[in-house]
């Protein structure tokens, strides 16, 4: 059993490598196709006064006039050793730019995701259990509205009410004024962005759990449990929820791209020091070294998340056919 | 002596999903809202002209009142009127991008499904690959290549959203291919092109139309997010995203109405579109009826 799961994981990893290569190569071609020349970009207005020899020297050193494939190969050779080139917009090595910011994004995303899951399970179960009640209507109606509302708009509303009007919680950054970064300070600053990210992602989980639970109420083992006279709460938690949670695992993997997108927007609203600012700067300044690295990285995370969800699914349900 | 009198069992709520409410009930409010929005967005710009350059500082930063239902912005322009114009831009971009993605998706999906074999596998691998890049990031990359502009935004949405249409069309074509009427057409001497254009495509058309409608809110959302990040439309073609981006600064000075209005309009419009397309989906795919019940 575990061996076949390991084999599936390996096969999926083997598929992830060509995907990442294709994505990075496509980004490379896109960067080359853009009308922006990195050398001109580097000099800016100073290119007028720069000596032609120096410009030519730089072109030679950077290899910008070589064929795309040769350039890509050079990039790839360096990338596997951890050298992702230099960011033109931030004048820093890309690995440094990402290293400084990634931790903050991971913190925001992981806590937000966990909260969204818990909210989804709790509210979804309650809504299904009390199907048709005012609670169910409130929860499902709220979910549809939140699904329709852009996350940054919800973020701005929360920021305005809780940080600017009520002044309960700080609304930006991770520290107040010139305070050093501390665990308590970060925890307080995290509350609003994490909550917004969680409530923007929760609707999908809530509706999914509710729907699956409602369907499982007709299944034989649930009907059987009720026929034996077990109380509702035991039937829901012990029989219905168990079987309906399996497809939930695949949803976790499928929601990852949306989660990353949501985090980008939430970070922008709350001036969170993660990768969002760097991404926007990179795009505005046509900084493909940074933008490409961030995109390839995000793709890797999505592929890995999907793999993880599938492995968990196979571990949780031995009936799953692994050779798909 | 045990009490043997019969008592009704306590009422349990663990029942199967109740049948969704009558479509009419769900259709009417959404359709009405959508019709009103469409009418306003089309008619108002014809009647009232919006001057983006207009500045009247005596009217600046007024909270909502009878004269200005959603207040005025920092230059004294009516927020509601700007919202109507912005919504028109957002909906147009969303609609155009959704149609382009539907056309691209249908072409790819139909070819993959009809030709099959290695060609199908190659195209579907491509779809999987693009699907694993987060949409907004891919959109940002495309905007970075083409520079922020209307074209860039439309291309960015179209290139990230055709995947759903391609998957739907492919699976429909695959299931249609094994039906007797296709065999009959082939036996009757129809060429590949004829089978594709006369028999397969007309039968996937309803699903494609539905997918396109469902894509519009996504496309609008994508455009709004890009514009909010400052990577979307130029200020003179302000969309809902631009407006929310602009309104951020006013929040600090207490101007909540400038952010509230555009977002609220967007939410109402999106809900109306999903409401209408939800009813439509239930009619097309009765089996999936429970998925989006209100």
Image: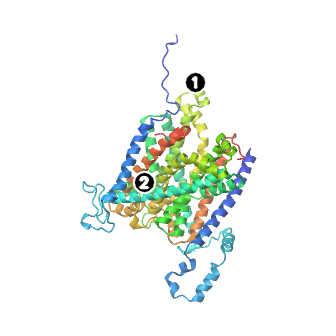
Q: Chain of mark 1?
A: A
> Residue B5 placed where, x, y %?
49, 13
Secondary structure beneath dot 2 equals helix
What residue is at 66 percent from the left and 60 percent from the top? A19
> Residue A245 placed where, x, y %?
59, 41
Secondary structure beneath dot 1 equals helix
What residue is at 55 percent from the left and 46 percent from the top? B207
- What number is the disc on residue A227? 1
How crowded is the residue under tag 1: few (<14 C-alpha within 10 Å), some, or many (20+)?
Answer: few
| Residue in the foreground of this view, choosing between A40 and B44 | B44
Q: Chain of mark 2?
A: A
In the image, residue B110 above or below residue A234: below
Q: Which residue is mark 2?
A: A154
Q: Is residue A139 visible?
A: yes
> Residue A110 placed where, x, y %?
55, 54
Q: Which of the 4 image quarters holds residue B74?
A: bottom left
């Amino acid at each position: 059993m575990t061996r076949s799961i390991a084999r599936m994981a390996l096969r999926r990893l083997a598929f992830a490598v060509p995907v990442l290569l294709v994505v990075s190569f496509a980004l490379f071609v896109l960067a080359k196709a853009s009308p922006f020349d990195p050398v001109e970009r580097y000099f800016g207005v100073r290119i007028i006064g720069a000596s032609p020899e120096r410009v030519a020297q730089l072109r030679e050193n950077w290899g910008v006039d070589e064929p795309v494939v040769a350039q890509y190969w050079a990039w790839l050779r360096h990338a596997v050793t951890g050298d992702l080139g230099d960011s033109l917009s931030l004048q820093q090595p890309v690995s440094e730019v990402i290293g400084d910011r990634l931790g903050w994004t991971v913190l925001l995303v992981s806590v937000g995701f966990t909260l969204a899951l818990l909210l989804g399970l709790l509210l979804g179960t309650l809504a299904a259990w009390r199907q048709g009640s005012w609670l169910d209507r409130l929860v499902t109606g709220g979910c549809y509205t939140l699904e329709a509302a852009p996350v940054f708009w919800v973020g701005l509303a929360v920021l305005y009410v809780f940080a600017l009007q009520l002044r309960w919680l700080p609304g930006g950054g991770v520290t107040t004024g010139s305070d050093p970064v501390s665990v308590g300070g970060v925890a307080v600053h995290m509350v609003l962005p994490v909550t917004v990210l969680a409530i923007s992602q929760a609707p999908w989980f809530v509706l999914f759990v509710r729907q699956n639970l409602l369907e499982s109420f007709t299944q034989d083992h649930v009907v059987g449990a009720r026929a034996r006279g077990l109380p509702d709460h035991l039937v829901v938690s012990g029989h219905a929820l168990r079987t309906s949670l399996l497809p939930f695992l695949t949803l976790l993997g499928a929601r990852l791209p949306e989660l990353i997108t949501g985090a980008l927007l939430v970070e922008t609203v709350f001036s969170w020091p993660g990768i969002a600012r760097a991404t926007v700067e990179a795009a505005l300044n046509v900084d493909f070294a940074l933008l490409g690295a961030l995109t390839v990285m995000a793709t890797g995370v999505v592929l890995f998340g999907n793999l993880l969800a599938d492995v968990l699914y196979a571990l949780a349900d031995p009936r799953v056919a692994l050779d798909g | 002596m045990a009490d043997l009198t019969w008592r009704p069992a306590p009422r349990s709520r663990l029942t199967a999903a109740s049948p969704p409410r009558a479509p009419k009930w769900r259709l009417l409010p959404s359709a009405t809202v959508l019709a009103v929005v469409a009418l306003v967005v089309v008619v108002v710009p014809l009647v009232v002209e919006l001057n983006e350059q207009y500045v009247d500082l005596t009217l600046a930063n007024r909270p909502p009142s009878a004269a200005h239902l959603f207040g005025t912005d920092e230059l004294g322009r009516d927020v509601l009127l700007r919202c109507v114009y912005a919504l028109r831009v957002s909906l147009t971009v969303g609609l155009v991008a959704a149609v382009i993605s539907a056309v691209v998706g249908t072409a790819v999906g139909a070819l993959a499904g009809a030709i099959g074999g290695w060609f199908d596998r190659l195209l579907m691998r491509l779809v999987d690959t693009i699907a694993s890049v987060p949409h907004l990031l891919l959109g940002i990359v495309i905007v970075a290549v083409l520079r922020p502009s209307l074209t860039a935004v439309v291309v960015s949405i179209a290139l990230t959203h055709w995947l759903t249409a391609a998957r739907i069309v492919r699976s429909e074509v695959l299931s249609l291919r094994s039906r007797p009427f296709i065999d009959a057409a082939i036996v009757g001497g129809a060429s590949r092109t004829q089978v594709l254009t006369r028999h397969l495509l007309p039968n996937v058309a309803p699903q494609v139309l539905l997918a396109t409608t469902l894509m519009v809110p996504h496309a609008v959302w994508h455009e709004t997010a890009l514009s909010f990040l400052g990577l979307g439309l130029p200020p003179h073609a302000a969309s809902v995203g631009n407006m929310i981006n602009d309104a951020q600064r006013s929040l600090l000075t207490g101007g909540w109405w400038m952010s509230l209005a555009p977002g609220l309009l967007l939410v109402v419009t999106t809900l109306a579109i999903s409401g209408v397309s939800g009813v439509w989906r239930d009619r097309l795919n009765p089996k999936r009826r429970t998925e989006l019940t209100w």
